[in-house]
Amino acid sequence: MIPALPRQSSKSRGESEAGTPLGDEASAPYRMRISRLTVDKLGIKLYDRVSAVLAEIIANAYDADATEVTVRLPFDTWLAPMAGKPITEPHEITVVDNGHGMTSDEVNSHYLLVGSDRRRRFGKDTSRRRERRVMGRKGIGKLAPFGICRTVEVITAGGEPTEHGYRVSHIKLHLEDMLFDSEKDYIPEVGHRDGTFSPKAGTTIHLSDFNRKLVPKGEELHRQLCARFGIRRDDWDVNVVNTGLSGALPGFTEDSFRLGELKIDLQEDTKVTFDRTLIPHTGADPLPVSGWLAYAKDAYKDEVMAGVRIYVRGKIVATTRDFGATSGYTGEWGVRSYLAGEIHAEWLDEEEDLVRSDRQDIIWSSELGQVLQTWGVGQIKALAKRGRSSVRKRTREVFEQAADLNSRLLADAPGDSRYRDSVKEAFRALVSDSDRESASDPERVERYVELAKTIAPHRDLLDTLRKVSEEVDNPLDVVLALFQKARIAEFYALGQVAQERVDVVNRLRDLIADGNTLERPLQELIEKAPWLLAPEWTPLGMNETLDRVRDSFETWCFTNRGSFVATPSIPNSERRPDFVLLNGARGTLWVVEIKRVNYRLTDEEFSRAVDYLGALEDFLDDTPELGREFPIRRLTFIVDHIDRLSRANRKLLENNEQIERRNWHDLLEQTDRAHRDFLAKVKKIRHQSAGL
């Protein structure tokens, strides 16, 4: 906080003792020239996460030559209570920097001027004192706080120091006043510190009067902020302090963190580093990129840590999973599941601005965007080939650990090392191309162990398994080769699983082909086989905790909201469900809104589903025992058309990371593609087994 020193007469600054403007608007010392629509579309709509807002404020501090930034906010806290709940003590987010600050003239000409290209305005793209390549350009990041709050207070001291210190400018911006339908300039409230002096230059931003937004836990907030910045400088330090410790449990130590690098566990033998590597550009100079690409040790469920982050001037501008690569290349599955990376390409934001207004993606269709995409696709395809053996090795390690294989084999055959080696060799070949997530299924792991023990004594089977596992990508090929060698009963269990999946895929295809299919059959199919949407999802009825969530949530809605919400239970065919609840990986609870084929989603239905998600979050927050089981909550619409949605709702669907939409034909295509090899091997097994 900038300390207050003796101030000038407030009347000479055109304000009352209370800090409000006096007299005619013409005498107001500060004014904002801005379209009301700009505030709504570029502030409220684009920035709806706390981390995104903090990133914009911190970036402004970097551009102002700050070397130290302190962010103070309550971790793991809702910033506003639910509607109808008692009002709690108001929260505040404060960001303090030691940058060069602003004079009152600069506040007017720079901060309160929205949408002006700062690089053209200043005639250069580096900072005032430290010659940093500035991140800001469009002049809209200052509106970001209005995505989470309604009052922004700016206290800044800059310019040349006087005998009293640096003169302070102090304003308060109120969203409700800014959105008032008028063509007049917006006149900010003048704060009580305006015209005083500070011994140091710098800027303090206070945010208050919040919408109902959640500040993540410290670890999650750190990941989100680290992912947004790729800055490594000795003269740059960001300290984030938790102000919500008063009610913490004994021993709670999550009081602060310093912004560092995003830590990702990598398979180091897959890492490729770029140090100003030149990308060919036809008819122009080559384009330099720096950074790295690699495979993560495990498939990330956390979207922040997955994929390749693209930075310009140290700030994230896009994230991509595959640079738009088409399907069908060797190692594609590994790239989709494990690719991580960081690429710096300064030329995306130099003479031509190729970064979208919300700084969440670049314009890939542009000439330079196409150059980066072509280069990126080539790199990940090369990485996919090199990384295949590394992914297999890591998969084998995960399964061996899950099976406790070494200890079990020592107990079974302490004096027979050859037998132990044979079992391990068979086990590794069987699991090398398995879905790593299935290692968490004890029954499947045990099946692999027993099958490996069956194969190990038969050298001809083991030799066949070893040879085939080196040549094919799919474990069903291994199964087929072994099936041709001997009729091992355990393989029939795999055939049953294959048949069940074939039946489900065919059922989905038939329902979609029938353009008159109603919602209930589709809901039942998704609940029975949620792997159609994502391999890691599980049915509601398979988890006792989820059953408790469903029953308790329905009761809670009736008690607290006076309305009954029905979530499906397959045995109960009399209820018409409002939506499907599914269990995602690692504590994710999914609300799935399913509409019939060729349906057009309406604003009313969209809003109702979003309200369902909000109600579910409120319920889990009110029920900590269950809430801890499902810290992540998501909403998915499965509907073919969204052209009837308002522009605001389409924008919300596009930008809110908790909400997604898929259409039925895309879902079928994704399912076919994901299971194409699987289904082909099933057909081949049937033909081969018929001839045995």
Image: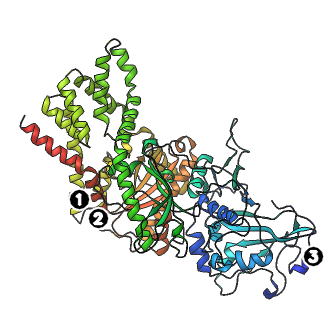
Label 1 to label 3: alpha-carbon separation: 76 Å
Question: In the rendered structure, which amino acid carries the disc numbered 3?
Answer: Ser
Residue 644 percent location from the top left of the image = 40, 74
N-terminal of the pair, mark 2 or mark 1, is 1
Q: Total number of numbered labels? A: 3
What residue is shown with label 1?
511
Please tell me which residue lies in front, 179 or 415: 415
Look at the image and tell me in which quarter the C terminus lies: top left
Is residue 577 found left or right of 460 in the rendered image? right
Q: Residue furthest left?
A: 691
- Residue at point 71%, 63% (across, down): 208
Q: Where is 329 relative to 604, above or below?
A: above
Is there a contact, CB below 8 Å, between mark 2 and mark 1?
Answer: yes
Q: Residues within 10 Å of mark 2 (few under 14, many from 20)?
A: many
Q: CA distance from mark 3 to mark 2?
A: 70 Å
Q: Which mark is residue 9?
A: 3
User: What residue lies at 24% left-to-right and 42% top-to-bottom?
Assistant: 472
Q: Determine which quarter of the picture holds residue 187.
A: bottom right
Q: Position of residue 240 (x, y in %)?
A: 69, 52
The local secondary structure at tag 2 comes to loop
Under mark 1, the amino acid is Leu
Residue 68: give x, y in percent of width and height: 73, 56
Is residue 530 visible in the rendered structure shown here? no
Question: 109 or 280, which lies in front?
Answer: 280
User: Which residue lies at the image location 33% right of the left edge and 31% below the top edge?
Assistant: 445
Residue for badge 2:
597
